[in-house]
Amino acid sequence: VRIVVHGGAGLVEPAREAACVAGCEAAVRAGLAVLGGGGSAVDAVVAAVRVLEDDPEFNAGVGCVLARDGTPELDAAIMDGANLGFGAVGAVPLLRRPIDLARAVLADGEHALLVGDAAWEFARERGFSPASVDELVTPRARERLARALARGRSQDQGPRGTVGACAIDLAGHVAAATSTGGLVGKRRGRVGDTPLPGCGTYADDLGGAASATGHGESIMRVTLTRQVVDRLRAGAGAQEAAQAALADLAARIGAEAGVIVVDRGGGVAAPHLSPDMPHGWGSVESVHAAVR
Ligand code: ASP
């Protein structure tokens, strides 16, 4: 069993490095607790992403970045590599645990992606209730929005903090999950790469699983995680597949991004074009984390 997690491509100020490493380690351990007990890759990536959503250091759940009008809208997705099951939510306001709602969409099975305010109809049926603004929005998120607004458009460079996880379980099944507040200062209604299959999130037992972070509008245009998994299916290992897909993104569009990968042999990789991308990985024997 193996798990790899990320806390977003971007720039980590030195004062935040220790907290980001600790957050990634905690997420890896949460995922390993599931995998070590014989749990599924799907349950493991949900457990890991929940830890990162609850951690205010990262742009997902608590501490998520804000849209232009100062409100949070959340994107999240989960994909099950065993059957290509996909569940996602996009631009849903005031959602405390976006990955849990994505999981509910996956379990329900009728649709793959629910968006916006109307997604609350389904969420309420499943027992979710909206978070208060104060629960989700941190002073740091407000400062980041103020800086972005001063520049006059949504951020496409700089600090981020989207989170994701990829895992392979005892049975050899893989899964990927990703969760984000999106880009600082985005328009309301904007949906990023995160909840789109093959863009921010993809998993297929025949290759492996991948979760991306970075400038969503660019990641979508190259369908980054599908590119990674296609290379895995063709026989490349995690590092080779991820680096080749990122090199293609860099050559074609030149965006800032990163991706985490687990291949069907249990190999993991976390390459990034951004200066930093907090990440962690582990197996039952050991846990590691780093900022870049
Ligand atoms: N990929 C995310 C988005 O564009 C942002 C990020 O990774 O930080 O929504």
Image (tube, grey):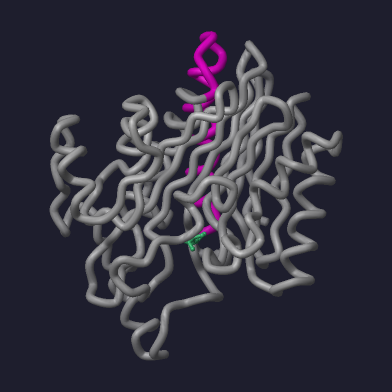
Quarter of the image for the C terminus: give it: bottom right
Residue displayed at 84% across by 46% down: 240
What is the magenta segment's predominant secondary structure?
Answer: helix
Q: Percent from the top left, x then y, of residue 226?
A: 66, 46
Q: Quadrant of residue 36?
A: top right
When the figure is inspected, residue 155 is found, relative to residue 7, above or below; the finding is: below
Residue displayed at 62% across by 54% down: 291
Identify the residue at the far front of this view. 110
* Residue 284 part of the magenta segment: no
Q: Percent from the top left, x then y, of residue 115?
A: 30, 52
Front one among 20 and 90: 90
Camera sees residue 49: yes
Residue displayed at 18% across by 36% down: 128
Residue displayed at 71% across by 49% down: 227
Quarter of the image for the N terminus: give it: top right
The stretch of residues the image draws in magenta is 16-41
Left or right of 270 in this view: 153: left
* Residue 33 part of the magenta segment: yes
